[in-house]
């Protein structure tokens, strides 16, 4: 069995945002030379997420509004975590969206349904954060 590891870095200028990273993950698969296996894509920061969904701007808008409704950023005083910080909402959003995704690799490609894409979700941006891509297989 072969193994491959790479870190992807992101610096989202806003507090929140979604970035389609499918192409970068596909490039990692090509670099790995693995044609049958699994890829783990993992946000390495507690206020960011990696998830699979449709690449449609209306959906991204709806996700952002829904998450903000579940865990609004303001008022920051509503959260105990925000003593000296202002990102408690980002931790909660990450808990809902998850930290990673795992996908199958078949014949050297992501084995996805017709609309599936991989996204990096940022909930407390404006600084560099990383995503781990780990691939195992043959």
Image (cartoon, rainbow, N blue to C red):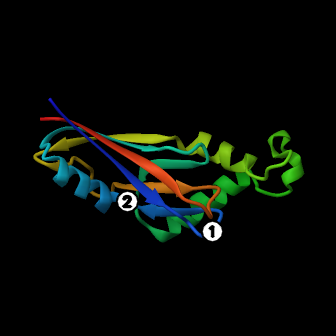
Looking at the image, is 44 positioned above or below residue 54? above
Q: Is residue 124 left or right of residue 58?
A: right
Along the viewing direction, whichever of 93 and 2 lies nearer the viewer: 2
Disc 2 element? loop
Name the residue rendered at 44%, 41% in the picture: 100
Q: Residue at x 50, y 43 (%)?
A: 44
Report which residue position mark 1 lands on.
14
Q: Give the answer, above or below, for where 20 lies relative to 6.
A: below
Quadrant into which the N terminus falls:
top left
Label 2–label 1 contact, CB within 8 A: no
Circle 2 residues within 10 Å: few <14, some 14–19, many ≥20 = some
Nearer the observer, 69 or 76: 76
Q: Is residue 27 above or below residue 71?
A: below
Q: Which residue is mark 2?
A: 21
Residue 53 in picture, x, y percent from top left: 42, 54
- Based on the displayed image, in which of its 4 quarters is residue 36 positioned? top left
Residue 65, position as x, y percentages in the image: 65, 61
Frontmost residue, 53 versus 15: 15
Q: Position of residue 126 (x, y in %)?
A: 62, 64
**Crowd around label 1: few <14 · some 14–19 · many ≥20 (10 Å):** few
**Residue most toward the right?**
77
Residue 92 badge: none
Q: Is residue 3 left or right of residue 74?
A: left
At horizontal 26% and vertical 49% (from top left) the residue drawn is 112
In the picture, the quarter occupied by the C terminus is top left
* Cα gap from disc 2 to disc 1, whole angstroms: 17 Å
Q: Secondary structure at mark 1?
A: loop
Q: Is residue 89 left or right of residue 50?
A: right
Q: Image check: 116 left or right of 28?
A: right
């Amino acid at each position: 069995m072969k193994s491959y590891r790479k870190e992807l870095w992101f610096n989202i200028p806003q507090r929140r945002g979604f970035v389609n990273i499918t192409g970068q993950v596909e490039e990692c698969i090509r670099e790995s030379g693995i044609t049958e296996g699994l890829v783990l894509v993992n946000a390495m920061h507690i206020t960011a997420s990696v998830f699979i969904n449709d690449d449609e701007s209306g959906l991204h808008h709806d996700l952002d509004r829904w998450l903000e409704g579940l865990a609004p950023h303001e008022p920051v005083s509503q959260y105990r975590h925000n003593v000296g910080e202002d990102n408690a909402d980002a931790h909660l959003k990450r808990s809902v969206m998850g930290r990673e995704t795992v996908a199958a690799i078949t014949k050297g490609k992501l084995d996805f349904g017709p609309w599936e894409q991989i996204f990096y979700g940022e909930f407390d941006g404006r600084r560099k954060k990383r995503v781990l891509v780990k691939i195992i297989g043959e």
